[in-house]
Image: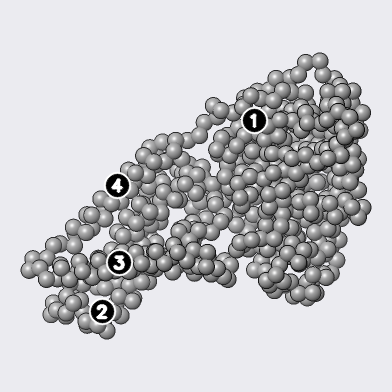
Amino acid sequence: MTPTAHRQPDAMLLTAIWGTLWGVAFGLCVLAPEVLATHRVRPESVGQWMVVVAGFCGVFAVLGAGLAVFAGFALVCLERLVAGEFRDRTWAYALSSGPLLVAAYALNSIFVHWMNFRSLSFWQDNRGQVALIIAAWLCAIGAVLRLYRWIGRREKRPAPAILGCGLATVAVSGVLVLVLRTPPPLTDSAVPDSLTRVSSRAEDPPLLFIGLDGAAWRVLQSAIDDGSAPTLRGVMAQGIHGTVEAAWPPYWSGAAWASILTGLPRDVTGVYEDLAGAGPGLPAFQVPLATSLLLNPFYTVRAALRQGGVIDFTPPPRTLLHGKPVWQLLYEAGVNTAVVRFRFTYPPDGQANVVVSDWVGEDQWEDLGVRRQALPDRVAPAHRATELLAPFLPTAPYTSDPFSELLPVLPDAPPSDTLRDPIRELRLASEIDRRTFEATEIILRESPVQPFLAVYIGGLDSVEHAFWQYRFPNDFSVNRPGPDDIEHLGPVIDRYVRYVDQSLARLLSLYTTRPNVLIVSDHGHGAATFESGWRGWHTKEGVFLLAGPSVPHMIDGVQVSYYDVLPTILDLKGFERPKAVTGTSVLRRVPSGPGGQSPSATRTQPR
């Protein structure tokens, strides 16, 4: 590399141009397959493929140009300090932009990770892979230097356009491989379509189905034992209790509830994440929430597109779920059903007699860009929209403030042991659960013998995420909370269980006929074992509680899978288990004798 007398192209312009070409080629071949896989994108038409590919090209071009220009400053400095000016600046920047882009991409990913977690512990967990990547990158640098020297020694140098054509060919090849390797869209051919009623059954009692997200026995049992949760204590003492075995670590709720509500595995339901996304011309996609060193810079662009209104993050709509949720199966079989804020309830029409979808009400998802409004098309039936939406209006009056009871005295300063504000999380959780219970009470006052009512309560999960270390400080040997935080914030989880218990008691008091009650959680809770914004995280052991006129008492606990919940509900409502569902009704496991009554005798002669 020696200086030349003639004027050479501008260094930053060269960096941007070649960064764009390298970015598109690298992105389409390396990043795009991972993006499609993690976001569960399955285009259904040529038009959707064109939008996806065009979107990828735009995103990777911007990433490539921006990161290459950032990294190009190092090359400019090298040129000035070492050679004054490269012998062939175009070839120098064309060849070096690739390795420099990879280095800048990796540094950006590490920076994003640090900003989220204030930690780089991933280095310790992946030292072998990181060392291998660095070695490969150094080899690439060596290859670039040798190739540049070879080009510089030739009397007639090849045109840099050759490299540009090569990168374009790589990009096109990446698109073809992407199209050929992407699985086809899911179909509903393997899911149950209708129910078969069991003959000679007496009229079933009403069934109240509570989805208590994140409930853990370690939390509930303490409240049951000390008498602060008398309603849960009565359900446990009179019926069946057990543990729901969560699947698919890190136990995301979206996939769990999809399987619980349909009785089908996630490769059939197609639901893997907690959020969905939508954009003009794009197929429906899911939004992974876990960070990824490979995709962190892409996630940064994704966040910018969301903030700019190009794409939207939403709760998972009904169209994302392959398979019918239990309330829809019962509704189509002639059972009067109602559902409040469960997942997959928007659009609400055709799902149940009464639907308050999860597209109303603010909760912790607002922090990730989900924006919901109390609009008439988000509840059903339409003529009850004013009544059903009333609790979710910003100006809705209420008679009690659970937040003031959950945390009577606000701390003087935010806790220092966590990256996020647990006080704000508690306020959001208690507010959305209060509004959810109020909407449910509206339904029960109108129909006090509601045959089937499903209610989703998500606040306990949020509170456990935010306050676990204060309630169970001994779970944390590192960065243990301070004694003042333990004293003031430690009781919050127990108070929240008491609040849920009191709210459940109010619902049960509105029934004029004693209902069966089923309470299920999608996973349990414990101390986080990996980097997370919260110090409490999902565990494998969830909660199962079932009691009522149709349910015998069992002393011993039972093990329940996601796939057993739907058959249990159908058994209680007098329907056969669909053949596509592999689980079994928990009622079929009740032994005869002192430990439990015969399920057949109990069901034909309700108590």
**Quick one: label 2 or label 4, which is nearer the N terminus?**
2
Q: For mark 1, what is the residue?
A: 582
Q: For label 2, count other residues whose C-alpha is less than 10 Å away and answer few (under 14), some (14-19) or many (20+).
A: some
Residue 598 spot, x, y in % from top left? 85, 26
Q: Residue at x 59, y 56 (%)?
A: 369
Quadrant of the frame with the C terminus: top right
Q: For label 4, count other residues whose C-alpha is less than 10 Å away and answer few (under 14), some (14-19) or many (20+).
A: some
Give the CA distance from mark 2 to mark 4. Answer: 34 Å
Give the CA distance from mark 1 to mark 3. Answer: 52 Å
Q: Assign a secondary structure to mark 4.
A: helix
Q: Could you tell me the amino acid type at mark 3?
A: Cys
Give the CA distance from mark 4 to mark 1. Answer: 42 Å
Q: Which residue is drawn at 10% across and 68% down?
A: 154
Q: Which residue is drawn at 83% across and 26% down?
A: 599
Give the CA distance from mark 3 to mark 2. Answer: 21 Å
**Relative side of 405 to 465, left or right:** right
Q: Do the residues labelled 1 and 3 touch (CB within 8 Å)?
A: no
Kindly identify which numbered label has been placed on residue 173.
4
Q: For mark 2, what is the residue?
A: 79
Kindly identify which numbered label has been placed on residue 139.
3
Q: For label 3, count other residues whose C-alpha is less than 10 Å away and answer few (under 14), some (14-19) or many (20+).
A: few
**Quick one: label 2 or label 1, which is nearer the N terminus?**
2
